[in-house]
Amino acid sequence: MLKRAQENGVKKIVCIGTDPEDSMAAREFAAKHPNVYWTYGIHPEETNPSRHASSHPSLRGSSLTRSPLVAKCLEDFVSSSLNPPVAIGEVGLDYHSEEYNRGAQIRLFEEMLQLADDNDLPVSFHVRNAFEDFFAVVANFPKTRGVLHSFTDSKKTLHKILETTDFYVGLNGLATYSTLPTPPLERTLLETDAPFLTPTPFRGIINEPGYVRAVAEWLSEKLGVNFETIEKVTTENARRLFRFQDTDVCQK
Ligand SMILES: [Zn+2]
């Protein structure tokens, strides 16, 4: 997969963590591969107790308040000091199910924003049907830098993001088969969201980083901007947000 990514011009990959365990797996994977980076995230859906019954035996039975997760997070984070993440995330708010505990999500999100703040790290936000609360929470963390990954909201919300924050907006395969609003190039980051959201013309198979090229090609056509410019500007955006260095190799 990494070889195919490279053949398609993908030079750096950020492996996204969505809970303490897979964040550590992402860390381990990044340590073994040049130009692969990792993030430390706890997805908002992790506050849903039923999720833990299947995926987190260690948390089974706990009536998940923020404390156990964030305590574990801080512990793992400190042990990462020699191989730090490039961002905190995915973190955020997801209200797509009525059953989700919004209060627990907000508390977790605030803790994670504080963690990002304390470590001067950008944030990969997951926000679904929850922008009102999202704007209210991030307003309390004015130093936050980040990207709204896999943006799926309205044109109006996109405008508000562009006008009232410095956040980037993540564009992935979904854009190639939907009618979502497109952010301006200078605020766009390209992402895979693999294994989901495989772009056209690869629909129906598992997504992987190399296919991000198809998203760049789609964007080039949509904006009427040549491919090299898309490549250059979105790479610069990612570099600025994650603070990649030119000399970054497998030194972690
Ligand atoms: Zn997400």
Image (spheres, rainbow, N blue to C red):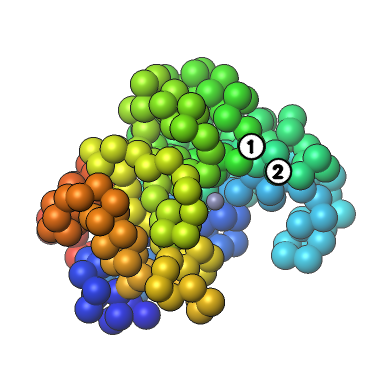
Q: Residue at x 41, y 59 (%)?
A: 176
Q: Which residue is mark 1?
A: 129
Left or right of 145: which side holds 220? left
2 and 1 marks in contact (CB < 8 Å) = yes
Give whichever of 221, 99 is nearer the camera: 221
Could you tell me which residue is drawn at 51 percent across and 69 percent down?
195
Is the CB–ligand 1 distance for label 2 below 8 Å? no
Looking at the image, is 62 positioned above or below residue 67?
A: below
Left or right: residue 53 versus residue 7 is: right
Q: Residues within 10 Å of mark 2 (few under 14, many from 20)?
A: few
Percent of width and height locating residue 65: 76, 39
Q: Which residue is mark 2?
A: 96
Q: Is residue 162 visible?
A: yes
Q: Amino acid at mark 2?
A: His
Residue at image location 64% in from the left, 37% down from the top: 129
Q: Residue at coordinates 77% horizontally, 58% vertically from top-left? A: 52
